[in-house]
Amino acid sequence: MEIKEIENKEIWESFLLKCQEKTFLDSWNWGEFNKMMRNKIWRLGILEDGELFSVALVIKIQARRGTFLFLPHGPVFKQQTTNNKQQVLKIFLEKLKEIAMEENAGFIRIGPIWERTEENIEIFKNLGFRDAPIHIHPELTWELDITLPENELLMQMRKTTRYLIRQAQKKFGVKIEQRNDIKSVEVLNNLYQETSIRHHFVPFSFEYLKNEFLAFQPDNQILVLLGEYKGEIVSSAIIIFWQKIAFYHHGASSLKYPKIPTSYFLQWEAIKEAKKKGCRLYNFWGIADTKSKIEKHPWAGLTLFKMGFGGYKKEYVKTQDFPISKKYWLTFVFEKLRKTKRGL
């Protein structure tokens, strides 16, 4: 096996089409987004007998807590077995250590898109990784198979969710608008900032939301959905459509009309749009760990909202860190304290 940088978009995206486990964080356009955010990136591929076998997007993150290399939802494989995963991860790790030394990075962080099994956890342990104090992208997601007819999807929902969708449409006259312009991102951002204050989380900047939109817009892979009631936008979402999967990546809402179920209707319209685009899955993105006491988690309400649409849980190996220098431990303590403060 050999490792090299992949510089051709078509080769990268064509390979990912053959992979089962993946998210838009592996896409070519997510790499372009990171370049727009002034992050240095590498698109690495491992070849066997001249054919791509595995790929990983590598991002250099420079933050106050330290500089590190990050692999979001990777590495991705065409075919996964225990032996080839460990072998491939070892090859990636040797290359990543070289890059880390060149870039003065204190550690390597991987957010694997590998099922959380003892076997997969052991692979990382064997190579010297440790559980990260925090995660950057979801380790637990909620997915829905949307290949079924609309009436069957409705019947699989929680009874309350189905009722609220119908109420929004028939009783309250809620309207959902689909847009793909920067102005719509500004509208969403206003609601998003309001939502962050209400739910006590640190929001992404408008620059982040805008650049994400601009990275996926040229390939028609992103939409902003706006929910309107009485002429006012009271709910919004950014949906990414990539390789037959739709991702609910950002959402925001107003509390001006708390009894109007605009967000429920908006999600249903997003699911229907995903079906029109030929998607097979709808990924609701992150949820709280249902094994813990969910009602105490900051994401409790959002998790119950997502689960109400039907579907199933996907659980990945926890985010993994590979320390390169002693500077890592300063980051570890900082992130551990921040996680405790946020109640996660």
Image (cartoon, rainbow, N blue to C red):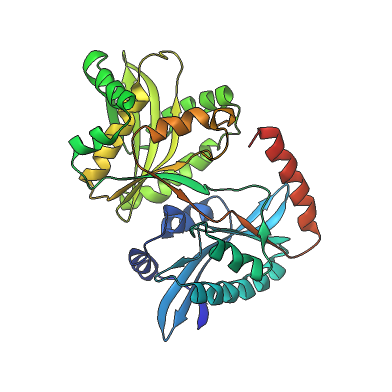
Q: How many badges with numbers are in the image?
A: 0
Q: Position of residue 175 (x, y in %)?
A: 27, 23
Q: Nearer the viewer, residue 184 or 78?
A: 78
Left or right: residue 291 versus residue 259 is right
Q: Position of residue 31 (x, y in %)?
A: 48, 58
Vertical order, 68 against 153 (above or below): below
Residue 30 percent coordinates (x, y): 46, 54
* Residue drawn where x is 40% and y is 35% of the image: 307
Name the residue rendered at 56%, 22% in the picture: 198
User: Which one is nearer the viewer's eye here, 204 or 47?
Assistant: 47
Instruction: Tell me the residue at 31%/15% (across/down).
Output: 231
The C terminus is located in which quarter? top right
Q: Quadrant of residue 172?
A: top left
- Left or right of 296? Residue 52 is left
Rendered view: 335 above or below 56: above
Q: Residue at x 68, y 40 (%)?
A: 339
Q: Is residue 41 visible?
A: no
- In the displayed structure, would residue 78 be above or below residue 1? above
| In the displayed structure image, the side of residue 118 where residue 330 appears, left or right | right
The picture places residue 150, in percent across and down from the top left corner, at: 20, 37
Residue 44 appears in the figure: yes
Where, by quadrant of the figure, is residue 205 drawn? Answer: top right
